[in-house]
Amino acid sequence: MSRAASDEQVELELEQELQDIDDVDAEVDDDEEYDYASDTSSYQYSSDEGAGDEGGGSKSKRSKTESSAKTAALKVNTNLGATAAQYQVISPTSLANQQNALIADVASVLSLPKPKASLLLRYFFWDKEKLMDRYCSDPEGVSQAAGALSTGQEEESKDVKRRCAICCEDETSQLVALGCKHFFCVDCWVPYLKIKIQEGPGCITTTCPQHGCSERVSDAIFQKLLPAADYARFQEYLLRSFVDINKTVKWCPAPGCDKAIASSGGLSTVSCVCGCLFCLRCGDEAHMPVSCEQLATWLEKCRNESETANWILANTKKCPKCAIRIEKNQGCNHMTCRSCKYEFCWTCMDVWSNHNANTGGYYKCNRYDPDTVPSDTDAARAKAELDRYLHYYQRFANHAEAGKFAARKREETDRRMAEFEAEANGSYMDVGFLNAAIDTMISCRRVLKFSYVYAYYLPQGKEKDLFEHLQEDLEKNTEHLTGLAEKPLDKVDRSDVINYTRVTENFLKNILGDVDNGLLSN
């Protein structure tokens, strides 16, 4: 197809898509989807991040434009089938406050010391209702099972000298015991607790050093015996357990981000204030339209050595005589097995002595023999499956790399915009549309990447045909938008970029919405 014809087709598609599209700002304001940016801006932790935005008018405009661009991009990224669900981004301080409030509430209702309430909550995976129900019916049994039967009855041997059961040194009065009354000196307690913390998150279930004793070490003992730095690390593990075993709360997986996200349920894809978009169910990066189970299977397949086995079957052949696997590493079809020295033809696997002038020439096996029926061999099946896998994996990997490039392009665009402002004396709004375009490109690349995983597991039929049509539309418009946005700033057509950004967002919403609602539901 000629370039003119291609441009004309794109223009027709653009006009068709723009018929029902209003102004960009009106669309953002009137959209009924959950507005992540406006909602998260109301939380306390986000106020500190915006404190440095005081300054001139240009900087104020930039902040406003960036917020609008991010809002539009995040709205596209959301799961269209869960628009009513909401979530909250929580700072570590807020998490710790919630955790302490839960402990205090349980301690107050059950008239327990806070250290014991904390141990009981950990045993029940921070499930308050389950703890209340079980504890009221059998307080002693629950306490014993949680290792908190005697929590709050710790002792220090100040007046009576005893011998430490670990080091067996001379009798001393510097001993500490849990409620189980197993006394150990402070010099043994401290290294024991430090080693437990070094072992990782399991330190929150540390038990008495006495062999066979199931009494757990309470927070109070950790705080009393350990230096501040070690106790702070223990508190980090305790806070991590509060999130890790909670199905409705997940840590943001972005490197260096310490925020957590809580959801009321029904929402899978969420966005942290750091910009990381991830799945609340499995903790991986946002992977619409593929499900968590399909993604896990795909990633396992990519790591699995079975693909190596498929490659071996597809690219090697067995020696017709000794059955040793042989890989062809040169161009000639005359093969000699290193094991048994058998000479044969790589193409037809017949003995090489049959390939001479008397038998039709060395290249007789390049001719198709209608009497030869293709055999359904393991190698043929493996090669077919490998080819199918590689078809989807290569496109999966290509869009992953393109997404990374787009992310780098966004960082570069900020610098290009600053240079353009300085040269043209224009406001940030003049070129701020590029950030929105690149954010849309990043979203599309991510969805396209995982769309090939979805297509890999989608059986042949009308549903797959429709999905591949939607996939093709999104891919075509994403590539066109990429070409428009990557032009030099002085050659970028602002209206074209804005229009194709909106059109591409619609194609993105179409594919996600149709998958979410069922491709053949209408």
Image (cartoon, rainbow, N blue to C red):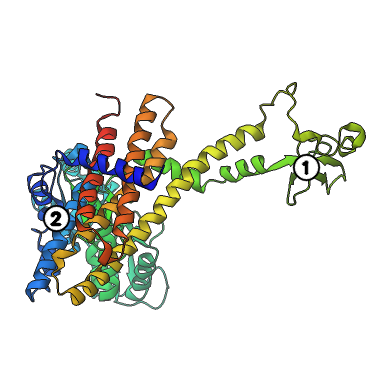
Residue found 30% across the figure and 56% down from its top: 484
Where 391 falls versus 36 (above or below)? above
Q: What kind of residue is marked 1? A: Ile
Relative image position of residue 58 (x, y in whole percent): 10, 72
Nearer the observer, disc 2 or disc 1?
2
In-front residue for pair 285/212: 285
In-front residue for pair 466/338: 466
**Residue 37 shows which numbered tag?**
2
Q: Is residue 243 shown left or right of residue 361?
A: left
Q: What kind of residue is marked 2? A: Ala
- Which image quarter holds the N terminus? top left
Disc 1 is placed on an element classified as loop
Where 382 falls versus 86 (above or below)? above
Q: Is residue 221 shown left or right of residue 408?
A: left
Where 422 falls versus 249 (above or below)? below
* Residue found at the far top of this picture: 371
Q: Would you identify the image quadrant in which residue 229 lies?
A: bottom left
Residue found 32% across the figure and 74% down from its top: 186
The residue identified by callout 1 is 324
Residue 200 in view of the camera = yes
Residue found 20% across the figure and 47% down from its top: 502
Relative image position of residue 291 (x, y in whole percent): 34, 39
Residue 148 in view of the camera = no
**Residue 95 shows which numbered tag?**
none
